[in-house]
Image (cartoon, helix red, strand yellow):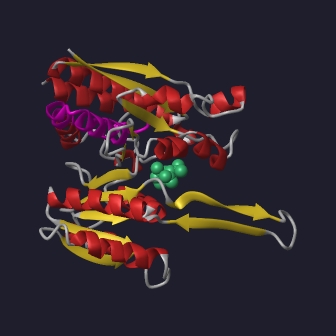
Amino acid sequence: MKTYSLALIPGDGIGVDVTNATMDVLNVAARRFGFALSPQSFPWSCEYYVETGAMMPEDGIETLRNFDAIYLGAVGWPDTVPDSVSLHGLLLPIRKAFMQYANIRPHRLLPKIEGPLKAEGFDILCIRENTEGEYAGAGGRVHQGTPNEVATEVSVFTRLGVERILRFAFEQARNRRGHLTSVTKSNAQKYSMVFWDEVTREIAEEYPDVTVSHMHIDAMAAKMVMTPQDLDVVVASNLFGDILTDLGAAIQGGLGLAASANISPDRANPSMFEPVHGSAPDIAGKNIANPIAAIWSGVMMLEHLGEATAAAAVLSAIETATGQGIGIRPGLNTTDEITTAIIAALEA
Ligand code: IPM
Ligand code: MN
């Protein structure tokens, strides 16, 4: 039987709740569709930091390298570890070390979910650059605490990085409705964003079957609220994509529904799957976190592993559950109730 090795990093807060829910569902899918998941759990988290002084061991990346995929719940417990430390000690280094340059986030309404908008029929696939740009980590601080204090955070856009994310996005558009919207801010940022626009035009020539729109991030934010149904694939830099995908989560009914995959397209390294939401310390361990975002991220993991039929079945089980009114509003159902409903639909 085909067996996939999974590195599980439940992390902090509700990351633990939703990782458990996801594995419960995926194990049922595995049994039903004739493959096996072999998970190994790692306790890397803010608690681990408090105990050891690091978010993961020094050889953490090497440890993860040989798994077929990584599943991560959430990272962050700001009461004990500043977010800038915890995220730079675990999530962000994994994305960079494994060249998970394509962060894929789908935004659409599941059955019976009423988003905050009048618009209903939108189906957006956001492709976020995931290794450089505004998150490159170039910068520094000098003269701290003095009137001369200086802080810089330099965005870094490389031809390699921009070309590969654009090609990836064009491929997605080609396999969907054939439209790509590239989001920049080239009216104000005249080096990096003008460069991105130029590269978009170059790569577009390789994809005559894809139509391309160029939008500025501010106008795009408005468009996602006013006419999201006109969008197909959206590609953006690391920070712009981060912001737009929280907006995407909001219009699809909330962060509890927004899935995400950090893909390393050449498959030389494992990809990582995680819900868009964070650790939500206020509701951690209370059995009220919505596991749908996490389980949907699990669907993306099954797709990536090549288990397309199982992936489609789990997604359809999620849709059956929300279609029955389960998990469609915050607080309506417990984590367990939602998970049980999805498993029941999967077994039906
Ligand atoms: C996300 C998150 C992370 C990001 C944070 C936690 C560093 O907001 O995955 O969208 O900005 O990438
Ligand atoms: Mn984010």
For this orientation, the residue located farthest to the front is: 160
Compared to residue 47, the image places residue 200 above or below, namely below
Residue located at (49% from left, 47% from top): 96
Q: Is residue 302 part of the magenta span, yes or no?
A: yes
Name the one closer to the observer, 62 or 119: 62
The spot of residue 56 in percent (x, y) is 60, 31
The spot of residue 107 in percent (x, y) is 29, 55
Compared to residue 213, the image places residue 27 above or below, namely above
- Res 217 visible: no
For this orientation, the residue located farthest to the right is: 146
Compared to residue 287, the image places residue 130 above or below, namely below
Name the one closer to the observer, 221 or 49: 49
The spot of residue 173 in percent (x, y) is 20, 61
Compared to residue 28, the image places residue 235 above or below, namely below
Q: Is residue 338 left or right of residue 92?
A: left
Q: Is residue 302 left or right of residue 158?
A: left
The spot of residue 273 in percent (x, y) is 38, 39
The span shown in magenta is: 288-314
Quadrant in which the N terminus is drawn:
top left
Quadrant in which the C terminus is drawn:
top left
Residue located at (34% from left, 46% from top): 259
Q: Is residue 84 part of the magenta span, yes or no?
A: no
Task: Report which quarter residue 330 is drawn in.
Answer: top left
- Res 51 visible: yes
Task: Report which quarter residue 296 is drawn in.
Answer: top left
Most common SS among magenta residues: helix
